[in-house]
Amino acid sequence: METVSSLPVSILFTMLALCLTLIMAWVVIKFLARIYSARDSNGEIKVRSTYALSTRLQLYIVNLRGTDYFLSVTSDRVDVIDKFPEPISHTESNVTASTAQPANDSTNHS
């Protein structure tokens, strides 16, 4: 009969251990989040603009250390389309389809 009386005590210790484990995990997660946010807070990489061409292809303008990069991003790869030594102004990056010029095609099939 001694094991019956120790069952509630065992359950209590198990619950206490579980609570302490969850609290310790929460503290570690908060600590790691603070470390990683401090690492990224220097602001070296900033996403300035995004545009989804399809569900698989997106375009980004990303600023890294004062240089803007025009990127093409898919689930498989990231390609640098162009690099701008000076940041693009907001009015330059919002080119509408009506004002955009088509690229010159060197393989003209006339």
Image (tube, rainbow, N blue to C red):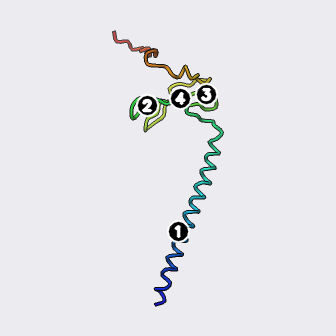
Quarter of the image where one finds residue 108: top left
Classify mark 1: residues with Cα within 10 Å, few (<14), some (14-19) or many (20+): few
Q: CA distance from mark 4 to mark 1?
A: 46 Å
**Res. 67 mark:** 3
**What kind of element bears circle 4?**
strand
Three-letter amino acid code of the residue under disc 3: Thr
Classify mark 4: residues with Cα within 10 Å, few (<14), some (14-19) or many (20+): many
Residue located at (49% from left, 19% from top): 95
Residue that numbered label 2 is attached to: 52
Rendered view: 16 above or below 35: below
**Marks 3 and 2: which is nearer the front?**
2
**What kind of element bears circle 2?**
strand
The quarter of the rendered structure image containing the C terminus is top left
Residue located at (61% from left, 45% from top): 37
In this orientation, which residue lies closer to the viewer: 63 or 99?
Answer: 99
Residue that numbered label 4 is attached to: 61
Residue located at (41% from left, 15% from top): 105
Classify mark 2: residues with Cα within 10 Å, few (<14), some (14-19) or many (20+): few
Looking at the picture, how far across and down is residue 13, in whole percent? Answer: 54, 75
Which badge, 4 or 2, comes first in the chain's sequence? 2
Which badge, 3 or 2, comes first in the chain's sequence? 2
**What kind of element bears circle 1?**
helix
Three-letter amino acid code of the residue under disc 1: Leu
Which badge, 3 or 4, comes first in the chain's sequence? 4
Which badge, 1 or 2, comes first in the chain's sequence? 1
Three-letter amino acid code of the residue under disc 4: Ile
In this orientation, which residue lies closer to the viewer: 51 or 102?
Answer: 51
Looking at the picture, how far across and down is residue 16, in whole percent? Answer: 55, 71
Which badge, 3 or 1, comes first in the chain's sequence? 1
In this orientation, which residue lies closer to the viewer: 60 or 82?
Answer: 60
Residue that numbered label 1 is attached to: 18
**Marks 3 and 1: which is nearer the front?**
1
